[in-house]
Image (tube, grey):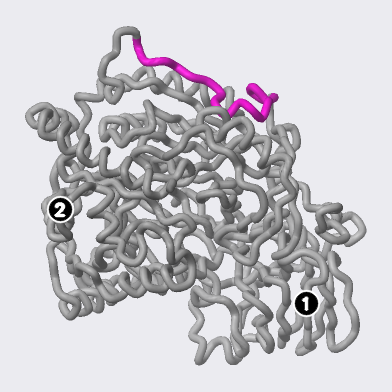
Amino acid sequence: MPEHDTDLHTDFGFSHGQTLAGFLRVLEVERPGMLTTVQDLPGRTGLWEVGVPPSGPMDARSLAHANALVGNDPGAAGLEATLEGPSFRIPGGGIIAVSGADAPITVDGQRAPANQAITVAAGALVDVGWATKGARIYIAFRGGLAVPEFLGSRSTFIAGRFGGHEGRPLVAGDRVVVGRVGDRGVPDAGVMHRPEPFPAAATADDPWILHVLHGPHGAPDVLAPEGLETMLSATWTVGTMADRTGVRLEGAEPEWARDSGGDAGLDPSNVTETPYALGAIMVSGSTPIIVGPDGPSLGGFAAPLCVAIRDRWKIGQLRPGDHVRLRPGDESGVVQASGGVVRGGTLRAGLTEAILAEDPAPPGATDLGLTPPVRYRRAGDQDLVVEYGEPVTDLALRFRVHALQQALQNVAIPGVLDVTPGMRCMQVRFNPSQLDHADLIAAMRELEAGLPPAAELEVPSREVVMPLCWEHPGVVEAMRRYAAGVRPDAPWCPDNIEFIRRINGLDSIAEVQDTILSASYCVIGLGDVYLGAPVALPLDPRHQLVTTKYTPPRTWTPENAVGIGGSFLCIYGMEGPGGYQMFGRTVQVWNRAASVGGVTAPGRVDGEPPWLLRHFDRIRFELVDEAELARLRDASAAGRHVVSITDGTLRLADRLALEAAHADEIATIRASRAAAFDAERERWNA
């Protein structure tokens, strides 16, 4: 077989039954180790808006370091193993390097060094053992691992079952293609420097230190000043739930500046849906969770702090039982994998300043949905959140966010990497080597000043009619598991639908169902719980139901469960954790047939993205029984369209006219539901 060139982004379409059998440049796995996956840098970018996480290595510095040792580009695909490394052979021989957590390395039984290039003879057995310090081990192969790209990256997203090697961790017997590079030699290992050493033992006396900045819900508007001090003074313990999705910290309980999240839910940690920055420390109830590279892009929990870029690699090396201290940081030490250093200085560098700048509503403004105040919030050292109005669910605010997003996309500011809308805010991720917060705020203010009047806005909006199986056995089972194993005394146990009825002051379960089936839900966000999962509001305020999210969240939710959390309806894009109050299940909102292999299924358009829904789609539900839903889900899983979609337009003026025409009725319904919500909160407090 001819040698390949130095382009490591070529997709190899090998047949596992034929070509690999005679191809020497492969990695043959004998023992997979614990949770060993293929990852590359920077992972999937530009898809945060539709709920596709970047994935990539949890400790990016160690993968880049190992790649440099073998002469690869820093972003070449390699292996990430958790706690225990793999054993493998390379029949044709090769050059590897191992970095990250401290773990013993042998080649045919002889000890080999970490953080150096290792020449492996043809057929030799490489064995990487259990980590003694740190949590994640990185193995680079000269030429990189040539697994196919999906959505622009070779990284594995395990929960989504795509990327990497067949969308999953490695197992014994796997054969993974290793790329080829020209003969350009191996760098002198003496000039390579390992990332800073790990603590000798991550104890309360010698903990990991994570430098943090605001991100974006700080004191005094969300956290009380005492709550911020609690987070910064406590010694935290890494919980057993520490994975690529997020790292849970256990210890103190931060104090809040309010007693509920209002429209967002009963708990003060609830916020209207806001994007998360990478490394954000969001707080669910009283539990801080550091968002990892496989974490959600959008959510309803406050994120008071964010780990600084320079310390983000440490998140990947935290292991259960380790101790952690959070320390105020600044932007002076921001270093990208490419070697670029942040330009400029800081803007209000004090950690007590979550809001970097604020523009009040125009004098005399009465409708703050149409002419709202604007706040510019820090979200770590790489993200800015532009936030409109007060913490209420007002569709006019979402229209304004959309107008700002369109304006930003039209000007293409150099250094802007990703834009993710939330309910009443927009998060802008940028390259700190090209932009700083002050420059970006100035640019966003200029765009904001040029936006058209909100009442004139209209957007493309398809009507999507989806089947719904009410009280599907899968969602009932998820409720049962939670009540049995997590929090049996939660007010939403044992029946989420009864809780929805009670907290909204409705007379019967039938009235809950009628309200949901009568509603047309407008998609205001995608990806709250991954992979194109819609977050939606009813267009008619009379159909608005308000609940609170699970605290703590469920550990398991069936794929495509449908529920309400705060003011929002959501369809879960995949199986996983969750907090919405569930009432049914529908068909897939993510086409897995497109995720594995890219083959266009019957009834689908070539090149169609795997996500079904778009921002501002209008969802309506039609009841089906369990058997019919099973049939439709099988057809959807095969990649066929099973929902009805009709093109249309949504005008903010129409929504405003509806509100005006039914103002008295809407006010009465809101008052009744607010009273029921307050009564439920009092029962919860008691």
Could you tell me which residue is drawn at 48 percent across and 77 percent down? Answer: 13
Magenta residue check for 297: no
Q: Secondary structure at mark 2?
A: loop
Residue at coordinates 82% horizontally, 58% vertically from top-left?
203
Q: CA distance from mark 1 to mark 2?
A: 58 Å
Q: Which residue is mark 1?
A: 130
In the depicted view, which residue is nearer to us: 522 or 137? Answer: 522
Q: Position of residue 48 (x, y in %)?
A: 45, 50
Residue 351 x, y percent position in the rendering? 66, 30
> In which quadrant of the rendered image does the N terminus lie?
bottom right
Numbered range of the magenta stretch = 345-362
Q: Splitting the image into 4 quarters, where does residue 374 fall? A: top left
Magenta span main SS = loop
Residue 655's tag is: none
Closer to the chain start, of discs 1 and 2, is 1
Residue 73 appearing in the image: no
Q: Position of residue 255 (x, y in %)?
A: 58, 39
Please tell me which residue is depicted at 46% across the width and 72% down the height of the picture. 161
Is residue 586 toward the left or the right of residue 78 in the image?
Answer: left
Residue at image mark 2: 507
Foreground residue, 200 or 185?
A: 200
